[in-house]
Image (tube, helix red, strand yellow):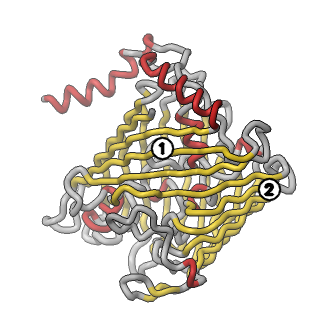
């Protein structure tokens, strides 16, 4: 009975509090100095979580006004922007691989982000900024439990990630890099410990703590996405609408070993890199989060990993397009193909189609479907679907129920159908 009451409350909440909206927002604004990264980059996340919106929130929380005013003062006086976020997720599967497997998984992410503009801050152009992101990711049911991210592979049978990013590792510096802009942002580079998913093959609904969580709705599973590691990315804009981006990073990146506070990877000095080249079209580069068409080619080196397994050379291409219009509609279409080789490569081919519908109160409804051909011989193709609804209760707190459907889960061949039911909460400061 208690569960029914809770669910009923959540379903009725948007109606009950619709009249309690307020167009004003107490947050002070940050300007994003990052002309390269996507929606998940530190610069964009700082702007997104600290900006003034025109949307109507159900519960305007004015008690935080002084906090954001102080943050704005620190930025104006010293060029320092920072944010604190916490996200928690619960995931349950309808099936498990065996009766001994656990259908439940839950975990959280503590995220600290900082951007410090040290070069040309007062000029406002050709800036140089130090970006730092520190993370702690943990399981709620113990460090030895399967994380939500790997529940498909370890517990329920989906060959993919039902909750991308929700894994376990000790507190660490996840990103630490310098970004320099030249010629009014026509040329830019970032060097240090970088996350290549911030720059390549992204779409507007890629953030797993705000949008879709499933692998079939985010990055292309045909690409060998290494962890954050030592490397660099260069962006050139020959025109306002066209760009070319090249990246070279440690082929695997951070090993995520407990207690290792700053791991940039083990293969960079051995000449083992992941190379990426992307060309794309945007109406203006400031609109790349919302409107972009791109083609990405990649090649990852062969190497012997820390488990003494040989990993072959991977290569492939991926296409991505998303277009936000009328301030509400956010469709995307993506596909990729590769030789299926790479330590973090899942598929030989995949196709993703999705759409996000944004509401006046900053709520969002997301729906997606995908198809993939796994890089495992003699298994069926997988089909996925995902739906979520993000309730923005205030400018600083949101909750998101979601559901995923998997057809032909690779590691659970006795089951044709697999469902995931999720619930996510997020706070920002």
Q: Residue at x 53, y 39 (%)?
A: 82
- The residue lying toward the viewer, choosing from 409 and 70, is 70
Q: CA distance from mark 1 to mark 2?
A: 30 Å
In the rendered view of the protein, which quadrant contains the N terminus? Answer: top left
Q: Estimate the x, y position of residue 429 in percent, counting from the top left.
A: 45, 33
Residue 359: tell me if it is visible: yes
**Helix, strand or loop under label 2:** strand
Residue 164: tell me if it is visible: no
Q: Estimate the x, y position of residue 80 in percent, counting from the top left.
A: 59, 39
Q: Is residue 378 above or below residue 357?
A: below
Q: Estimate the x, y position of residue 225 in percent, counting from the top left.
A: 52, 67
Numbered badge on residue 211: 1
Q: Is residue 191 above or below residue 224?
A: above
Label 1: few (<14), some (14–19) or many (≥20) C-alpha neighbours in 10 Å: many
Q: Residue furthest top?
A: 19
Q: Estimate the x, y position of residue 3 in percent, counting from the top left.
A: 18, 32
Q: Residue at x 61, y 28 (%)?
A: 29
- The residue lying toward the viewer, choosing from 369 and 134, is 134
* Residue 192 figure quarter: bottom right
Q: Which residue in the structure is indicated by mark 2?
A: 187
* Residue 260 figure quarter: bottom left
Q: Residue at x 36, y 83 (%)?
A: 307
Dot in front, 1 or 2: 2
């Amino acid at each position: 009975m208690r569960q029914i009451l809770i669910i009923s409350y959540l379903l009725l909440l948007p109606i009950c509090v619709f009249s309690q909206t307020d167009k004003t927002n107490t947050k002070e604004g940050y300007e994003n100095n990052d002309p390269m990264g996507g929606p998940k980059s530190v610069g964009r996340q700082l702007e997104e979580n600290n900006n003034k919106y025109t949307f109507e929130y159900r519960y305007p929380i004015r008690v935080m006004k002084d906090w954001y005013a102080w943050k704005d003062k620190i930025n104006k006086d010293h060029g320092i922007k920072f944010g604190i976020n916490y996200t928690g997720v619960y995931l349950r599967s309808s099936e498990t691989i065996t009766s001994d497997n656990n259908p439940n998984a839950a975990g959280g992410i503590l995220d600290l982000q900082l951007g410090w503009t040290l070069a040309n801050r007062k000029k406002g152009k050709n800036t140089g900024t130090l970006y730092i992101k520190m993370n702690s990711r943990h399981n709620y049911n113990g460090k030895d439990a399967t994380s939500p991210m790997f529940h498909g592979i370890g517990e329920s049978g989906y060959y993919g990630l039902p909750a991308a990013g929700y894994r376990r590792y000790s507190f660490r510096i996840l990103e630490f890099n310098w970004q320099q802009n030249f010629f009014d942002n026509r040329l830019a580079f970032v060097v240090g410990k970088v996350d290549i998913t911030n720059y390549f093959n992204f779409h507007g609904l890629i953030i797993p703590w705000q949008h879709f969580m499933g692998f079939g709705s985010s990055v292309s599973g045909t690409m060998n996405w290494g962890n954050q590691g030592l490397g660099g990315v260069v962006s050139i804009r020959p025109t306002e609408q066209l760009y070319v981006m090249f990246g070279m990073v440690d082929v695997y990146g951070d090993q995520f070993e407990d207690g290792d506070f700053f791991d940039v990877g083990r293969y960079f000095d051995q000449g083992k890199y992941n190379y990426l080249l992307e060309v794309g079209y945007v109406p203006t580069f400031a609109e790349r989060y919302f409107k972009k068409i791109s083609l990405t080619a990649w090649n990852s080196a062969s190497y012997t990993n820390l488990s003494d397994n040989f990993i072959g050379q991977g290569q492939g291409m991926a296409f991505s397009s998303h277009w936000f219009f009328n301030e509400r509609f956010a469709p995307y279409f993506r596909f990729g193909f590769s030789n299926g080789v790479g330590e973090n490569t899942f598929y030989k081919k995949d196709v993703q189609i999705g759409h996000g519908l944004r509401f006046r109160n900053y709520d969002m409804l997301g729906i997606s479907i995908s198809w993939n051909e796994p890089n495992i011989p003699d298994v069926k193709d997988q089909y996925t679907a995902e739906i979520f609804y993000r309730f923005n209760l205030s400018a600083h707190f949101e909750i998101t129920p979601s559901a995923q459907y998997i057809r032909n889960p690779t590691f659970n061949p006795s089951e044709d159908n697999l469902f995931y039911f999720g619930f996510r909460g997020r706070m920002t400061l």
